[in-house]
Image (tube, rainbow, N blue to C red):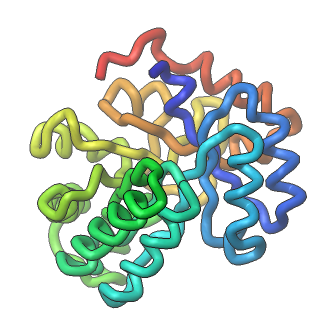
């Protein structure tokens, strides 16, 4: 797998029409599209079907966080839709994570399809240290919290975590090379920071050890999304060492 196959584009739009237009423009270069809460709430499973029909894969970014039984049910539906990857909030606790893993695997076996990659959300990249401590009430540093959550995710059988690239090196050192790291909050060198706090460039993210990066507005809001995607590719290292 080369780096082009590890760049995920976020379809953060509010209609199926807009999402379909973006997928049509990008499907020749982008192989995985992230479907988040806004788009899925507006369109439901048909947006997943649309991406699959275009020959691409889906990262279902709904960040499930509820009682274990409810999250298990959602995990079954995600697996049944055939998504490549979906996520849950690690702060939901051990039993919630375990039941999500079991439900996803069972549903995949039942339908004779590959089980989705299940990853956990650590600390949202929009949160900085002061906000995490003072507003949310989580003590310690961001890195300490991320490592604690990532360790719990690995313990319960998740494939990896969503984390800022700024914590990637620490997670790799603690949990090894096989644990999947998906990095949002990516901003190319030529783009604006916008509302993200803990961000890095695509090149930095891969050099630090990210397995996948998620890029949204710098590509999707560009006048020419395909050209913007190519500019992202041009920033990346020639080879991925992990």
Image coords of residue 197 (percent x, y): 47, 56
In the image, 22 versus 188, the foreground residue is: 22
Image coords of residue 55 (percent x, y): 70, 38
In the image, is residue 155 above or below residue 240?
Answer: below
Image coords of residue 115 (percent x, y): 40, 53
126 left or right, relative to 221? left
Picture quadrant where residue 73 is located: bottom left
Q: Residue furthest top?
A: 238
- Residue at 40 percent of width and 28 percent of height: 206
In the image, is residue 156 above or below residue 94?
Answer: above
- Residue at 38 percent of width and 86 percent of height: 66
- Residue at 75 percent of width and 46 percent of height: 53
Q: Quadrant of the C terminus?
A: top left
The mark total stands at 0
Picture quadrant where residue 49 is located: bottom right
In the image, 180 versus 70, the foreground residue is: 70
In the image, 175 versus 208, the foreground residue is: 175
35 left or right, relative to 121? right
Image coords of residue 74 (percent x, y): 47, 77
165 left or right, relative to 221? left
In the image, is residue 240 above or below residue 121?
Answer: above
- Residue at 30 percent of width and 85 percent of height: 68
In the image, is residue 36 above or below residue 233?
Answer: below
Q: Quadrant of the N terminus?
A: top left
In the image, 11 versus 234, the foreground residue is: 11
């Amino acid at each position: 797998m080369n780096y082009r196959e590890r760049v995920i584009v976020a379809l953060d739009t509010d209609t199926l029409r807009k999402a379909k237009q973006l997928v049509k423009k990008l499907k020749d270069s982008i192989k995985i599209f992230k479907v988040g809460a806004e788009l899925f709430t507006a369109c439901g499973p048909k947006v997943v079907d649309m991406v699959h029909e275009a020959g691409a894969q889906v990262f279902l970014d709904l960040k499930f966080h509820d009682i274990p039984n409810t999250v298990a049910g959602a995990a079954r539906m995600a697996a049944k839709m055939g998504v490549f990857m979906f996520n849950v909030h690690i702060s939901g606790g051990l039993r919630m994570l375990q039941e999500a893993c079991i439900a996803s695997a069972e549903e995949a076996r039942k339908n004779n399809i590959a089980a989705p990659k299940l990853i956990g959300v650590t600390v949202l990249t929009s949160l900085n240290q002061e906000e995490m401590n003072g507003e949310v009430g989580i003590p310690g540093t961001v890195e300490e919290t991320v490592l604690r959550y990532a360790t719990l995710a690995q313990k319960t059988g998740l494939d990896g975590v969503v984390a800022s690239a700024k914590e990637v090196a620490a997670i790799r050192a603690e949990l090894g090379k096989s644990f999947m790291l998906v990095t949002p909050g990516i901003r190319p060198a030529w783009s604006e920071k916008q509302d993200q706090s803990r961000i890095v460039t695509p090149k930095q993210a891969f050099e630090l050890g990210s397995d996948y990066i998620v890029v949204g507005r710098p590509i999707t809001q560009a006048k020419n999304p395909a050209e913007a995607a190519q500019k992202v590719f041009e920033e990346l290292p020639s080879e991925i060492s992990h």
